[in-house]
Amino acid sequence: MLLGTSRCIRSLIYESVQPPRSCQRRYISTLGSPYRRLGSLSQTTTSCLKNSHLKDESLSNSPCNDQAAGTASQATTTSSPDSSASSSSSQVITSESNRNKENGFLREPSPEPSHGFVHPTQSWGSSMDEDLNASSSCRKDKASSSSIAGTSESEQPKPKQSGGLAKRVSFGVLMGIVGGAAVVVKPLFLIAATFISYQATIEYYSMVTSKGITKGMPPPPPLISSLTTVLCVSMVFFSYFFRGKSGTVLAVAAFFLLVMNLVAIRKPTFSMLASTLFGVFYCGWLPSFWVKVRLLPMSAPDIPLLPAIFAPFSGWTVGLLATFTAAACVVAADTGAYFVGKKLGRTKLTEISPKKTVEGALGGLISSISVAVGLWGLTQWPATPLGAAGLGVFTFFASLFGDLIESIIKRDAGMKDSGDLIPGHGGLLDRFDSYMFTGAVTYFYIVFVLPVLPYVGS
């Protein structure tokens, strides 16, 4: 009896087999009360197909069908006390419909039933809607659980590639060796400063011409960027061959670039003019101060051993010691800030660079002062430990804010690195941004601050 009822309900839902006319009429006559639909439907279809002996052993029970059947039974019992006799048949109906819907056989009901036959899904009560909703929600839970399982398998965190820190340290050591040799030998120092100025201009204009900065205005034409590169490199040469006299060169270069902006661009804006002037200042005039520091002619304190080692390569001058000390303080500040911030960093320093912390900055400051005082104990320059500590403080703040200024340019440009010249470090400006203002600050400290320190102590 139950199998016959299931077979009839399947034929009614799918419209694949039309029931007899008498069954249709008898079914339609039972549509008067929504509380008697399921019971009347089961009695009618049972009498129509009482001789059916179909077997469907492939269908198996599932938690979803049990849940839907329970929902339909509860809804039928609550709706009418007289419908308790048809609870078993309603369970069969809902279980069979849920199985078929899960297997993909259920079709959407036709908008207009043919032969005057009303589709069962258009006339069943609320109990059938509830069991269909319960089946659908259970299938959604299954799908979500399977998708979560697939996601957990496919999106497992990949192991981090080892060797990133080793590459960074190895190239940092290599740059330190090359930089040390360039500091000692003056011609190599000129070549290094020229290359830094050239590459810094290239990376600067790669950021200035990016979509993030040029949004709403045309980027600088190639003529302007090429002229800026030539003038920046020329300022380094002028500082070397004319003993640091580059102030006049900066003024003339700035005026020439402003004129070329007016000629090459139809309607230049103030932002274009400002970016051009900052480029020649940032990539040309600031690196030239390192040349000024290196060429300081004052004699350094006479100490054993060291003057004899450096005598074949260059004179034992304040310029040599000041360049080496300032560069060492920058390295110490960056290294100390990195490791202290990584271990103890908790308080964010600024929104410009979220990874920088107050604890890391204090670690960099202490490292810079320690290196400056340590080199004073070795070379006896500056004359007092206070002067050495002051140089460490000035160098630290110049390196810190030089890094932040370059971070602002990269943030506006929408770039993580200024380039990819140095493996493990990014572009040249990513590595030398801390040095850009340090040369000018060191030169100012030596020329204007150190001479007055003895009077301040007295």
Image (cartoon, rainbow, N blue to C red):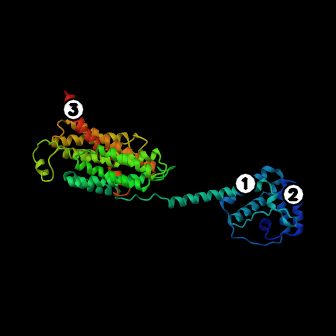
Q: Is residue 312 left or right of residue 220?
A: left
Which numbered disc flags the more N-terminal residue, 2 or 1?
Answer: 2
Q: Nearer the viewer, residue 266 or 431?
A: 266
Q: Residue 414: where, in percent of width, then height? A: 46, 51
Mark 3 vs mark 1, foreground winner is 3
Label 3 crowd (10 A; few <14 / some 14-19 / many >=20)? some
Residue positioned 83% across, 63% down in the render: 112
28 lies above or below 50: above
- Tag 2 near tag 1, CB within 8 Å: no
Where is residue 174, by image quadrant? Answer: bottom left
Residue positioned 28% across, 39% down in the render: 394
Which numbered disc flags the more N-terminal residue, 3 or 1?
Answer: 1
Give the amino acid type for the residue marked by disc 3 in the picture.
Leu
The residue identified by callout 1 is: 71
Give the amino acid type for the residue marked by disc 2 in the picture.
Leu
Mark 2 vs mark 1, foreground winner is 2
Secondary element type, mark 2: loop
Q: Is residue 3 left or right of residue 304?
A: right
Label 2 crowd (10 A; few <14 / some 14-19 / many >=20)? some
Q: Residue 291: where, in percent of width, then height? A: 25, 48
The residue identified by callout 2 is: 31
Q: Nearer the viewer, residue 189 or 433?
A: 189
Mark 2 vs mark 3, foreground winner is 3
Q: Residue 228: where, in percent of width, then height? A: 36, 52
Confirm whether residue 339 shows in the render: no
Which numbered disc flags the more N-terminal residue, 2 or 3?
Answer: 2
Confirm whether residue 171 shows in the render: yes
Q: Nearer the viewer, residue 267 or 391?
A: 267
Secondary element type, mark 3: helix
The residue identified by callout 3 is: 453
